[in-house]
Structures are given as C-alpha cells and as structure tokens.
Image: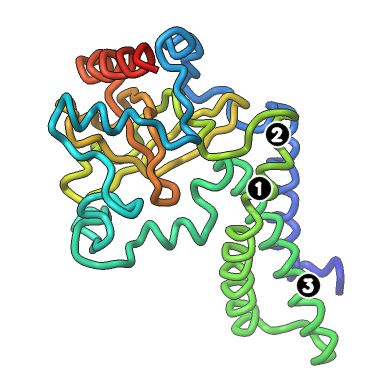
Amino acid sequence: MLFSIENLPYWIFLGAGTLLFGLVIVSGGGDDDVDADIDTDLDLDADIDVDMDAGIDVDADIDADLDADVDAPSGRVPGFAEADPGPDGEAIAGSGFTPLDILGWLGVGKAPIILLLALDLCLWGLLGWMATVILGGLLRFIPFFLLRIPILLGSMVAALLIGGQIARPIGKIFSSFGESASADRLVGCTGKVSSARLHNVSTGKIAQVDVVDPAKNLVTVNAVLPIWAKNQPTIGEKVLVIERSDKAYLYFVIAKDSEDEEQWFSVISPAKSSR
C-alpha cells in the first residue's frame, strides 16, 4: 500500500518539493534569474547611514519639510487599520481584516516564494501519503475515489497552513550565514511591482512588490507609497525600499530613478549631517 498507484500524486508532490529544495540550495537560497537587482551602491553607504532599528528621526524631518505625516500614531499606517478588499482584491479602508492577512498566514512575505512552494509541496505530499496509508490500514482497503478527494484537499489545506507557520524559521535556516534575517534587511534593496500598481498610503490600499534581499532570496512583500510620493509605479517597474512600517510585513517604497528618489536622498542627507 505504501507504493500503491493511488499514492502517485503525493509522491509527485513530494518529489517536486524535494527538487525545489535542491534548487534553493544550489542557487544560494533564492531565485537568481529574477530581474530585480540589489543596489549596494545606492549611495546608502555615503548618504544613508541611518539606524533603522533605532526608529530613525527621518520621519520627523519629512514631516517638517513636506508637511506629511508618514507614520501614524501607535505604529499604525493612516487609513490602514480598517481595510476591506477592493474589486481587484486589494485592501481598502473599512475593515480590520484583509485578504493579505490570509497571505501572511500562508507564509507569503516570510520566506522566499520558491522556498515556500517547496515546503508546501513536500508537506502536501507527505501529509496526503500518510493520510491515505493510515486510512487504508484502518479500512483494510485502499480508499475509493470519492474518499480520496477529501484527503487530497484536506492535506493541501493542512500543508498550506503548516507551511505558513514554519516558513520563517525554515527561511532563516536557508539564509546565508551571518546575514541578518530581520525584515529590515530589505531596506535599501530594489524590486519590481507585481501588482497592477502601487498606491499611496493615504488611500489605504496595499500592493505587492517582489524584492531580492542581500542573500539573493526572492521575497514578496506588501508595499505602499509614502504620502509625499508623486510617482505611481505600475506592474514590472522598479522600486526602492526605503523603510519598513511598524505594521507587520508592510514596506514603504518609491519609484526607482525618479524625482521621489532624489527627494528622499535630499531629506536623508541633511538628517545624517545634523547628527
């Protein structure tokens, strides 16, 4: 019964997940063929030597220069605490729970997508195979077709939920040694917009951005534009991650090589020189 043809789908899932794990190891922990590069010479070393963990006083400088309150009180983003799903699946103001919270439960943004997929496939194959074997042993016969469908779907749901919870520690294991595993490691990295467009934080809508961290891990994160941003990047355009919000898994980004980037550096430089 262990190697019965009825278990073939689960062996395929398990094999595919194992191959993806091998690809993660060979590629150094993520996708190298993603056209989103790490800008290590963004003048961050020269212009941005700010301590992001210390809560940086840049927000105060932005408020003074641009009359815009980028950070909301108590670590909340304006218009963000209450969000409803919009017609295109994006979150808009109106409710405390959004579809993006579900993505967080499934592990999106906690680990590289390829690693998360490998983990989910392995768990799906293992859980489905075990459930089929155990149930077959109890019933003394291989579960018939109608019974195998709930096993297939149930093992998939269980794999997604379990994979989402262990994605972060697994991602840390696969990270390069000595590389910070904190979310602040993405600040200063560049990425590409994967949603239709990015939205200003004042709208209360969220979009997704694919970012490659310094360890070459591909991470999909929730992102918004700061309130002072003038450019609205669309799908496929490059952006620069400038700050992580106090709200989990939310980042502020601006259009790469734009006037917004110049404005950001012009605000950061005086902030550094005044210290």
For residue 174, above or below residue 206: above
Q: Of marks 2 and 1, which one's residue comes earlier in the chain? A: 2
Residue nearer the viewer, 262 or 46: 46
Q: Which mark is residue 23?
A: 2
Q: Which mark is residue 174?
A: none
Looking at the rendered structure, the secondary structure element under dot 1 is helix
For residue 127, above or below residue 235: below
Residue 242 at x, y = what percent?
A: 37, 28
Looking at the rendered structure, the secondary structure element under dot 3 is helix
The residue that label 3 is drawn on is 130
The residue that label 1 is drawn on is 118
Mark 2 near mark 1, Cβ–Cβ under 8 Å? yes
Label 2 crowd bin: few (<14), some (14–19), many (20+), radius 10 Å: some
Q: Is residue 2 left or right of residue 233?
A: right
Query: Disc 3 and disc 1: Cα gap in Å?
Result: 18 Å
Query: Disc 2 and disc 1: Cα gap in Å?
Result: 9 Å
Residue at the image point whose x is 48% and y is 27% from the top: 51
Q: Is residue 180 left or right of residue 275?
A: right
Q: Of marks 3 and 1, which one's residue comes earlier in the chain? A: 1
Looking at the picture, which amino acid does disc 2 mark?
A: Leu
